Amino acid sequence: MGPNCLSVYDPDNTWNFCPSLPAAILFTVLFGIVSALHVFQAARYKTTFCWAIIMGALWETASFLIRNISIYNPKSEGPADTWFLLFLLAPLWINAFDYMLLGRMVFQYLPNQKLGGIKAQRMALYFVILDIVSFIVQIGGGLMVISKNNKTRENGLHIYTAGLVLQECFILVFAALVFTFNRHVKREAPVEQAARAKKLVLALYASLVLISIRIIYRLLEFAGSFDSALTQELWTHEVYQYALDGTPMFFALLIMVVMHPGQVLPGEMSTFKQFSPNRVVMQGEQKSGRRFFGRKKVGSSGSSLEPIQMNAAPGQDNSWAKH
């Protein structure tokens, strides 16, 4: 129960239920921890593209932090509108990160750096643009939903729902590309590299499923009118927000902590830079002697490393893939 829980029939109350302060504090702490872990790992592995998932984690954290403020001030519309919009839009950052990750995987794992006839860089760009389109539609609908005008709110529901449908359609197409990539990498990459790629593929699948669960929940919540029984059920019970939105997004972030892309694609390998055949990459590998994309260990001491050609263009020597 909130410290200033008002009657849901109070016209000044911004809440449709009596919110739980302990739950809000718990999720603030959980998202705060996972945000800190993502910042730490991005710095450790030098994966600058992880800024997108960091933004998603920070927006989730800020949403629940402001939710606490709103619980203490149930009549204040500012905090209520802010946490609501952040809560609605934060998952789009996580979704964008998934798109950016697959593009880099295609660039590093597939010899021709293409998937479905699309270059890795362009594929990542196209899906991020589609995510931005979905973002714009959803933020437009979200802003209308918090309006006091009933007609505007109803229109906002429909616009936000359209944005969710777009997002899920993009996810389904993207999931098909992830499946296609997995098939290609099994055939074209060495066994060790395919095993590494599989970890990221599984992480992507899990993230997409969790985001889809959240989208389905929001579709059920917003698809009807404010007077519909289903919408009223979902809007007036806080447990659905935590179980079908907050929790899936927390695990989507946590999965990318456990199977962080930087563990497989650290530093410049997480970019779209073309590696030179004579360039040695993977700083720090000399100590461990591990075999990776950019070079292999020669000799028993692990102190000497021989460069391996990477990402050869079609028609060039692809002998590196046979080592």
Image: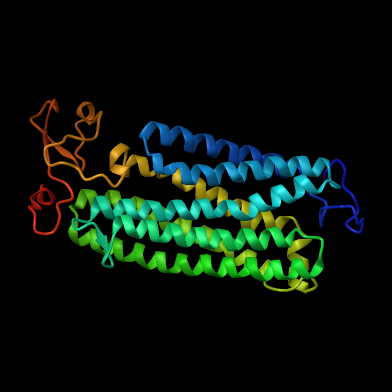
The picture places residue 214, in percent across and down from the top left corner, at 59, 60
Is residue 165 left or right of 80 when viewed as pictured?
Answer: left
The picture places residue 298, in percent across and down from the top left corner, at 9, 33
| Image-quadrant location for residue 30 | top right
Q: Nearer the viewer, residue 115 or 237?
A: 115
The picture places residue 60, in percent across and down from the top left corner, at 61, 46
Q: Which residue occupies 41% across, 69% down?
A: 173
Image colouring = rainbow
**Number of marks in the image?**
0
Is residue 287 left or right of 235 when viewed as pictured?
Answer: left
The picture places residue 101, in percent across and down from the top left corner, at 38, 51
Is residue 239 left or right of 174 when viewed as pictured?
Answer: right
Q: Which residue occupies 76% across, 67% down?
A: 152
Q: Nearer the viewer, residue 243 or 8?
A: 8
| Image-quadrant location for residue 44 | top left
Is residue 105 left or right of 249 when viewed as pictured?
Answer: left
Q: Nearer the viewer, residue 185 or 78?
A: 78
Q: Which residue occupies 46% across, 66% down?
A: 170
Q: Nearer the viewer, residue 204 or 169?
A: 169
Q: Which residue occupies 90% across, 50% down?
A: 6
Above-or-below relation of 69 to 207: above
Above-or-below relation of 74 to 17: above
